[in-house]
Amino acid sequence: MRASSTKEDGVFTFRTSITFAVMAFIAAVAGLLIDSIYAAYDNGGLLQMRPLYHLNDEQRTKLRVPAGAAFGISLIRPTPTGALPMRRVFEDQQGNELEQLDLWKYSYDPRVRAWYIDTMKADRTFISSPYIAFSVGAAVITVSRDRATGQAKGASNWISGRS
């Protein structure tokens, strides 16, 4: 998994990467298979990192995973008109980019999902009830915490896992 930081979009920062690492550790201790780690923002933006090794053929096809891809990175960047297009970047085991896929009409808005709403209401770490993941159609739970900062008001970090 490759980490980067840019001031231009403010989506991924060093602080976010540390939070991801801590939450991944918590999920591992709890015995969860990590489906993905992500941060969602109050403007509809989303950064998701996902290992692809545990996906079945149907799920890989749904996500349009190219041969040899070990990791998927999805980024939703809201447009000035409010549209929420997604870019998926697929990388091999060494972190080399294999392919980019732009989904201009993906229409996924994390702000209307129960896990986002419940997390923003909670004043502590929140563990969701099981639900079916939008992207892969698998049963998951989400461990989340509101991580509002001056850089990204309303940002929250989540781990979705399968037991």
Image (tube, rainbow, N blue to C red):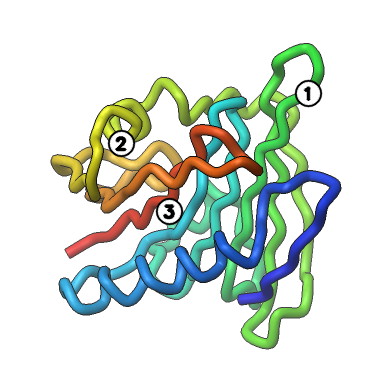
The residue beneath circle 3 is 58
Q: Residue at 61% of width from left, 39% of height from top?
A: 152
SS label for mark 3: helix
The residue beneath circle 1 is 79
Instruction: Using the numbered discs, state the Cα–Cα distance from disc 2 to disc 1 in whole angstroms.
Output: 24 Å
Instruction: Using the numbered discs, state the Cα–Cα distance from disc 3 to disc 2 in whole angstroms.
Output: 30 Å
Which of the two labelled residues, at mark 1 and mark 3, occupies the earlier sequence position? Answer: 3
Q: Check if mark 3's residue and mark 2's residue have beta carbons within 8 Å.
A: no
The local crowd at label 3, few if under 14, some if 14 to 19, many if 20 or more residues have their Cα within 10 Å, is few
Q: Is residue 106 left or right of residue 42?
A: right
The C terminus: image quadrant: bottom left
Residue type pointed to by label 1 = Thr
The local crowd at label 1, few if under 14, some if 14 to 19, many if 20 or more residues have their Cα within 10 Å, is few
SS label for mark 2: helix
Q: Which mark is residue 33?
A: none
Which of the two labelled residues, at mark 2 and mark 1, occupies the earlier sequence position? Answer: 1
Instruction: Using the numbered discs, state the Cα–Cα distance from disc 1 to disc 3 in whole angstroms.
Output: 31 Å
Q: Which mark is residue 119?
A: 2
Q: Horizontal and vertical percent for residue 95?
A: 70, 80
Q: Is residue 127 left or right of residue 53?
A: left
Q: Residue at 14% of width from left, 40% of height from top?
A: 129
Residue 77, placed above or below residue 56:
above
Viewer-nearest of discs 3 and 2 = 2
Residue type pointed to by label 3 = Glu
Which of the two labelled residues, at mark 3 and mark 2, occupies the earlier sequence position? Answer: 3
Q: Which image quadrant is residue 98 in?
A: bottom right
Q: Residue at 52% of width from left, 25% of height from top?
A: 109
